[in-house]
Structures are given as C-alpha cells and as structure tokens.
Image (cartoon, rainbow, N blue to C red):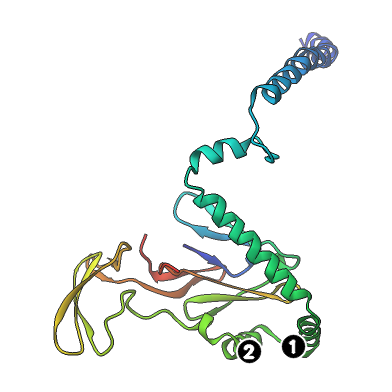
Amino acid sequence: MSIPQRLEDGVAVGSQGVKLYVDGSSAADSVGTVADDKVFYPDVANDTDALIGADPRRR
Amino acid sequence: MSHRLATGLKRWRTWVPAICLLAIAVGGPAAGMASRQSRTAAPRRPGSTHSNAVSKASADPSGVFRRSVERAIQKQAAHRAWLRTPSVRQARRRSRRAYRGLNRHAAVLLARQQFRSQLKPLPPHLVQAPSGGKILSYINDHAVRVSTANRQRAVAISSLPLRDATASGGTAPVNLTLKTRDRASSRPTRSCQ
C-alpha cells in the first residue's frame, strides 16, 4: 500500500496496479501530512477533510 | 516510386471513409437489432430499472446485498437531512470562517484535538492482549500466545497476518506506522500483504 502526498496521485493498493481516488471538488489540490499511521488531507471538499491509513481490523 | 505512393495514398483517402461508412451502415442496424432483442428478451422484475437487477437478485438470494445497499442509502439520507438542519448549517458556516487560512500542520493539530479517536495510532501489535495480560510469543503468522491478568495462558488466532518477513530474513509484528520513502508517497513500515 502506498499513500500519496498529493491526493490526485491516488492510493495504490497491492501490486496489481489498483489505485483509489478520492472524489471531491478540491481533492486534486490537497496535500497530505503524515500523522503517525495515517495521512491527513485538509479541505478535499466543502467542509471536508480526508484521513487515509491502513487498518486491517474489522469494523 | 514516390509518385505511385502518393497516388496510392490519394486512393486510400477516398476508400477509407467509404469503408468506414459501409461498416457503420452494416453495423448500425445489426447493433440496433441486437439491442432491441436484448430489450425484449431480458425479463424484468417489477419495479427494476436496470437489467443488472435480475442477475444481482439471482446472485443475492438471501437479500443481504440488497438490504446493505438499502441501509447505506437510508444512512446517507439521514446524514443529508442532518446536514440541512439549521443549527448544523450555522455551525458549518461558522466553522468555514473560523479555520480559514490554517496551514497543513495547524490543521493536523486541530484534527488531533477534535478527532482524537480517528487519529489515534493503531496499537503496535494488531492483536490485543486481554486487559492486564501481554503477548508472550508468536506461534505463526496468524496466532500468538498471550497471558491473562491472572497468569493463565491462551492462544489468540487472527484471520489476518499478524507478522511479516523482515529484510534480514526474520519475522516481526506488522507495523502500520507510515514511512515516507520518497517525497511523493508513504508506505506502512511492515504491512501484512
């Protein structure tokens, strides 16, 4: 798993080339900051921040 | 030679659009017939708006998928309704002005204060020992030996891998703390593949 600094680059999962992208009006411009085991992206959309991390625990 | 080639190209310029038009003329009605046939042949469930609904229904005989989708739609509708309430709209409007101009690090600090549980780091071991106990050893990638508060021993088993191979050839517990390998991305220190 690879979490990008720029959200527009997408989150790479596994080795098969799968990438996840966040939909949002400002998501492409959002730059992340590493916070322990997660990356925090401020203002990805109106009133919205994003937090991305690996969490294998079942919810 | 170049004259012949030029003449040939000129001919192709005439022929290629003609072939394309022919292909459209042949493919068009056939494609239209095929789509009409599929429209008439595919049976529809009452109330369904998409032919995929039939295949999904047969793949979901117990209705688990349908119920989970309905729950998600209801949850989303409830969240939207909550967002439209006057007090929440006012709070959001106030929030937009209050935190304008925060840089990234200040935003993270604020998030740590406001969303403590979401930003709380994962425990160093994915499996949690019982209260007062501790992890004694890893039996294999999916099982650990733990001790309880009253010094009894137990085995905890996980369907997910709890440790992974290290670069030196040994094994170590999964560690999802992010490491920035290059400036463009971060990866977990040791993830379970």
Question: Where is the N terminus of chain B found, in terms of image quarters?
Answer: top right
Q: Nearer the viewer, residue B6 or B157?
A: B157
Circle 2 sits on which residue? B110
- As drawn, the residue found furthest toward the front would be B46
Task: Please state which of residues B8 and B4 is positioned toward the viewer in this rendering.
Answer: B8
Residue at mark 1: chain? B
Query: Compared with residue B103, is residue B183 higher up or lower down, i.e. above or below?
Result: above
Q: Quadrant of residue A47?
A: bottom right
Quarter where residue A21 is shown: bottom right
Under mark 1, the amino acid is: Tyr
**Relative height, residue B166 to residue B17 (above, below):** below
Q: Residue at x 80, y 12 (%)?
A: B22
Mark 1 lies on a secondary structure that is: loop
Task: State yes or no: discs 1 and 2 in contact (Cβ < 8 Å).
Answer: yes
Relative depth, front residue between B145 and A20: B145
Looking at the image, which residue is at 51% across and 37% down?
A: B58
Residue B78 placement, left or right of B127: right
Tell me residue B146's x, y (percent): 20, 79
Q: Secondary structure at mark 2?
A: helix
Looking at the picture, how far across and down is residue A9, in whole percent? 62, 61
Q: Which of the two residues, B52 or B1, is positioned nearer the viewer here?
A: B52
Extreme residue toward the left, this view: B152
Residue at the disc numbered 1: B99
The kind of residue on which mark 2 rests is Leu
